[in-house]
Amino acid sequence: MNRKRVLVAPLDWGLGHATRCVPIIRELQKQNAEVIIGSHGKPLKILRQEFPEIESCVINGYGITYRRSGSFAMAIIPQIPKLINSGFAEHKKLNRLVKDLNLNGVISDNRFGLFNHMVSCVFMTHQVGIIMPPVFKWAEKFIYKLNYRIMNKYDYCWIPDYSGEENLSGILSHKYPVPKQTTFIGPLSRFKKQEGLEIKNDLLVILSGPEPQRTVLEEKLVQQLCDLNLKTLIVRGTPGNESELKTPEHIRVVSHLNANELNKEMMQAKYIVSRSGYSTIMDLAATGKKAMLIPTPGQTEQEYLGDYFHSKNIFYSDSQTAFNLKNALNEIENFSGLELKTANHQLENAVKDFLEKC
């Protein structure tokens, strides 16, 4: 029996889309599929490091640029033509890749153009509805309908969450109707809770997301950490970039850690400081760690998730501008953290069904 050849292609906005593809790739391998990784920039570097034996190819990113200050949405809107052109370009490239790589299926993590009628195609997202900033709230239903239309071009829609009231994504995936081909595959994380490890750091700071905001947060946190005698590890989220960051002796800095190393460091830290992206929320739930969340300014998804979990007294969250580490440490014990208690068989079943129909 020939092994099914499946392209797994995450979006290149931040690292979360790539990291949550790790359990997807592992499950595909477990079920004897032959995986090809397709991405660009840091996401491709991370997946190549995690799976050096796997074939890979470059699928260009969307080339979106961000501001050091001001609205994220206002920075994106002028670049919508670039987004559309990138979607068409990756759709054309996929048409060639299906033949050149002899593909049987495609799993696209939020890449809009990776559908093809010759093979089975999955669109994975946790944002069925996209939260718009207040000034564009009037356009939210229109954006949902546009997103719905894109999802319907795919044979499957996978949502990495639970379908019921006990879920992690809130209104992002539970406010609007989902396409009929949708499967909730359960939360995805490359991490797991590990027992028997002693706490060795007060804080683990995990930096991620687009520049220049990643650097803005790094500078802010390093400045505040210099005034606090807390044993801290900073993971900069810059794979392949070994530039030095000068810090006091109680602060250790690394550019990147692989999944096993980062999983261990999470378990050996008392608290986590990170962005509030959805992949981070799933990682925190998988490890059961308490965290201080700092949304990327203007990213409505992260701002919503930060507020959502803060209001439930699960994770402490504050804006990047207002965040004060000393104040956060005084409050964090009032927040419970989150822990997944059930094995994820939804993913196993979804992958099995997908491979059978490839």
Image (spheres, rainbow, N blue to C red):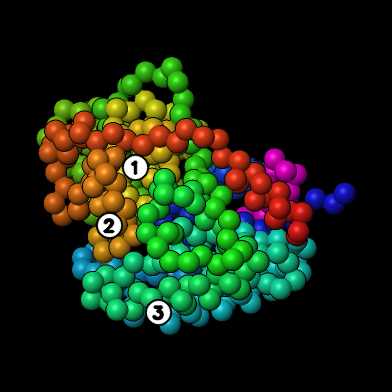
- From the image, tell me which residue sits under label 2: 303
Q: Is residue 96 left or right of residue 258?
A: right
Q: Please give left or right for residue 171 compared with residue 221 in the image.
A: right
Instruction: Look at the image and give the residue range highlighted in magenta.
Output: 28-37
Q: Hey, what amino acid is under mark 1?
A: Ile
* Residue 312 falls within the magenta-colored stretch: no
What residue is disc 3 on? 142
- Where residue 246 sits: x, y (%)? 24, 40
Closer to the observer: label 1 or label 3? 3
Question: Three-letter amino acid code at disc 2?
Answer: Glu
* 92 relative to 48, above or below: below
- Inter-mark Cα distance, 2 to 3: 21 Å
- Percent of width and height locating residue 320: 20, 53
* Image point (15%, 55%), residue name: 321
State the image quarter where residue 156 is shown: bottom right
Circle 1 is placed at which residue position? Answer: 206
Helix, strand or loop at disc 1?
strand
Tell me if 217 is positioned left or right of 42 in this view.
Answer: left
Crowding at label 2, few (<14), some or many (≥20) Cα neighbours within 10 Å?
Answer: many
Residue 42 visible: no
Q: Residue at x 48, y 36 (%)?
A: 191
Spot occupied by residue 20 in the image (x, y as percentages of width and height): 51, 48
Q: Secondary structure at mark 3?
A: helix
The percent coordinates of residue 341 (x first, y second) are: 47, 33
Measured Cα–Cα span from mark 1 to mark 3: 35 Å
Is residue 301 something one can see in this rendering?
A: yes
For the C terminus, give its image quadrant: bottom right
Mark 3 or mark 1, which is nearer the start of the sequence? 3
